[in-house]
Amino acid sequence: MLASLNHACGSFRVCLKMIRTEKQGLGALIKITLPYFALTAAYAAFVFLLEENIGDHIFKVSAQIGSVFGIAVAFFLGFRMNSAYDRWWEARKIFGNLVNNSRSFTAKIYTYFQSPSNIVPDEDINRTVIAKELIDLTCCYISQLKNEIHEVPHPPYDQKTQSLFKKYAVEQTHKVSNEVLISLSTKIEMVFADKANIEKRDLMEHINQFYNIQGKAERINNTPFLKIYSAFTRVTVLFYVLMIPFIIGDIDIGGEDSHLELLAIPLLSIVSTLFLTINKLANLYGDPLEENTTSVPIDQICQTIIENCQEVKVKLS
């Protein structure tokens, strides 16, 4: 009975989260589509009035031309949207790997530094202090990677970070993220004893994973999605939207004397807004690491990683 109640409560929470997410998505969608709808409605009204004043159906183009052209535009948009989503999902997987690798790395630092036999016997080496500093360096790396992706390679560092960089010889005039990883690798190589090669190799493998994750993120960030194709798709969609009123013409519902033919204006606006919105979403999803409503939430992800790492650090106290 209790298990069924817990399952029901869990399902209810999932449903609430889905509803909340859909509401947020609907709000963002409305913000994108409203300007398009207003502009296309004004344009459709202008063409409609021009047609009524000059001559009914004088501008109407063959429906077959419109159908063929519309199918071609749909193919362009379909490929563009699928490719853009693939880039977005790849970026999300990259930062998912960053989350997993960072948590595992800090957890192993906590575990391996608990055993004195893993560390070189030296009175000047304080295992707890070094483990905390390595975790702090990991947090600095996460924050620095985020800043470099946002094109801020040298943000203002606080006093604690400056002191840590100075102690571990992090050269701030170079690529700071690489310098931090070098400092982590050097310290791990220095403090682990020869008989702890398995532990040391395990931690160094995580360093390699950081390099791989960073390289993949930089590849997406520095390689825009086929700019010429994007420009060609945008021009094609815009031309098709401008042609839609001439392709469809007005809608004579109830005869010329009825005003029901004005329904052509919202209908044309809806069709035009649909094509323009899909193209806009494809452009947004094609840049998954930019700071917009559809990008991968790397600020939130990195903040979560840092908080998780700090929680491990607290356990060392």
Image: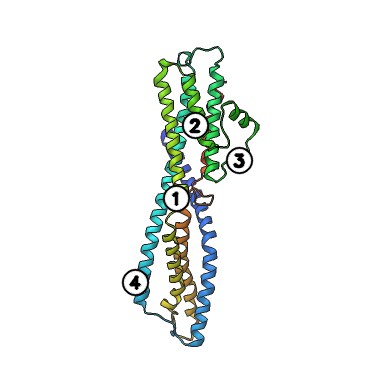
Which residue is tagged 2?
181
Report the Cα–Cα distance between label 3 and label 2.
18 Å
Residue 142 against residue 126 in the figure, above or below: below
| Mark 4 nearby-residue class (10 Å; few <14, some 14–19, many ≥20) | few
**Which amino acid type corresponds to the residue marked 2 in the rendered image?**
Leu
Give 146 or 21, whichever is nearer the viewer.
Answer: 146
Residue 26 against residue 98 in the figure, above or below: below
| Mark 2 nearby-residue class (10 Å; few <14, some 14–19, many ≥20) | many
| Mark 3 nearby-residue class (10 Å; few <14, some 14–19, many ≥20) | few
**Which amino acid type corresponds to the residue marked 4 in the rendered image?**
Val
Which residue is tagged 3?
155
Report the Cα–Cα distance between label 4 and label 1.
33 Å
Q: Where does the image place residue 81, in percent across and percent down from the top left?
A: 41, 57
**Which amino acid type corresponds to the residue marked 3 in the rendered image?**
Pro
N-term-proximal mark, 4 vs 2: 4
Give 276 or 136, whichever is nearer the viewer.
Answer: 136
In this view of the protein, can residue 310 be seen by the observer?
no
Task: Describe the element under mark 2 as helix, strand or loop.
Answer: helix
Which residue is tagged 4?
68
N-term-proximal mark, 4 vs 1: 4
Q: Where does the image place residue 46, in percent across and percent down from the top left?
A: 53, 78
